[in-house]
Amino acid sequence: MADYKHKSMKSDGVVLTGRIEAANERDAYRKLVEKGLEPFFIKPATTTGLPFLGRLTNRLNAKARARYVRQMATLLAAGLPLLDCMESLSRNGHPELRARSLKIRQGLRAGERLSQAIAANMPDFPPYLSQLAELGEQTGGLADALSDAAQRMEQEEALRREIRSALTYPAFLAATGVAITIFMFLVVVPQFEAMIGDDYSKLPLISKMVLSTSAVFRDHTLAIGIGAIVLLSGVLGFTRSRDARARFKALLDRTPVVGPFLRRAQLANWARTMGIAMRNGAPLLAAFDLAARSVTSPAFSQGLKEARRAVRAGEPLDEALSNGVALDPTFTDLLRTGRQAAALDRMLVFMSDILDDDARERAKRITALAEPVAILLISLVVGTLVVGIVLAMTSLYQFEI
């Protein structure tokens, strides 16, 4: 017999965590079911390893969320009843998603619609997921709606993955540069400082700055370390604040390089969401409102509000967007063609594909600049330190002559 850790759900929705003794995982599952529980996580108990590493590896990331929605859409498209679909999802995949699947299944049993259960139990999923699920319920195309949502989530994750991959090496260079700078301030410069002495009056300005900065680092290492930790904590707290993120995004919107990239990415997300909504049977204004909820840029959101008022007053969508969000003439022509051919949903998705490709190329260009910029900054910092030390030693040599 062995010990097994488990997470199980009671009939009232309460999640229990504990251990049970059993011959194997199947036996542990059977014993928990006999106790009236619905186990969704069973693993051999172990006392080795670092717990926080397990938490890090079990984090629910965007890739796992997209895979979950894709599995749900695939099971429904295969003809599996909704309750059976959620039961299947509760037995596989990420432990947290298994628990949420059980909660969704219980909500469905209690009479909730899937869109309501998703909104209640999946707060960290994109908001358009529950909205598209609601459209699918209304039109009878739930599997298609979820498949469209999964496709968009996968595309967003692919773009994020490309950007992260492109920034990995520049981030490594930046971290290496910081480590080299700290090492020189704490180890290398003090060795030369002992040779130079305490009299900096006849040294060049750059040498004085290098030696003084090294002394500050050496004398206040603990305070600087604590300050760095506090600063990092503040940045992390800032990123978790919705208002702070909104202000930061508004600031980025006005920057010359990043701003245009973010605006086109927002327009692509909006166009794709609206096109998918219309493809799943949403009326024009309803699809417009659903897509507008996915916009995070304050400036773009205000432009969409003006465009919506124009559409509500009877103005065609292409003209309203051209005036409200300064849409490019190419996209205005695309939407006009789609409206005249009664294929606006397809044109919106096609427009988003073009914008996504453009955003991907812009992201590559921006991230391509990060590597030389990081190398330049490291070279400037290290070069300044070396020049300061060399000038100080040269001055010392001249004094002795």
Image: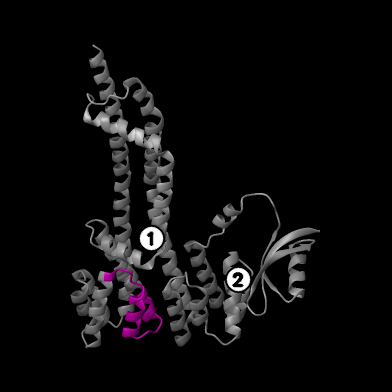
Q: In screen coordinates, is 75 left or right of 396?
A: right
**Residue type marked 1:** Phe
Give the class, few, some or many, for how many residues have Cα within 10 Å of label 2's Cα (few <14, many ≥20): many
Is 293 magenta? The answer is yes
Q: Which residue appears at 43% of the width and 49% of the height?
A: 229
Residue 42: tell me if it is visible: yes
Position of residue 251 relative to residue 326, above or below, is above
Question: What is the x, y in percent for residue 291?
Answer: 35, 76
**Residue type marked 2:** Ala
Question: What is the x, y in percent for residue 334?
Answer: 24, 73
Is 9 magenta? The answer is no
Give the class, few, some or many, for how many residues have Cα within 10 Å of label 1's Cα (few <14, many ≥20): some
Q: Which residue appears at 33% of the width and 81% of the height?
A: 289
Position of residue 82 relative to residue 351, above or below, is below
Q: Which residue appears at 74% of the width and 71% of the height?
A: 32
Position of residue 50 relative to residue 222, above or below, is below
Q: CA distance from mark 1 to mark 2?
A: 30 Å
Question: What is the x, y in percent for residue 18?
Answer: 70, 65
Choose top left, top right, bottom left or bottom right for residue 239.
Answer: bottom left
The disc, 1 or 2, on the residue closer to the chain's N-terminal end is 2
Q: In screen coordinates, is 51 left or right of 317?
A: right
Which quarter of the rendered picture does the C terminus lie within? top left
Q: Which residue is mark 2?
A: 99
Q: Magenta residues: mostly which secondary structure?
A: helix
Q: Which residue is mark 1?
A: 238
Question: What is the x, y in percent for residue 171?
Answer: 39, 46
Task: Report the front residue among 183 and 93.
Answer: 183
Part of the protein shown in magenta = 273-298
Q: Nearer the viewer, mark 1 or mark 2?
A: 1
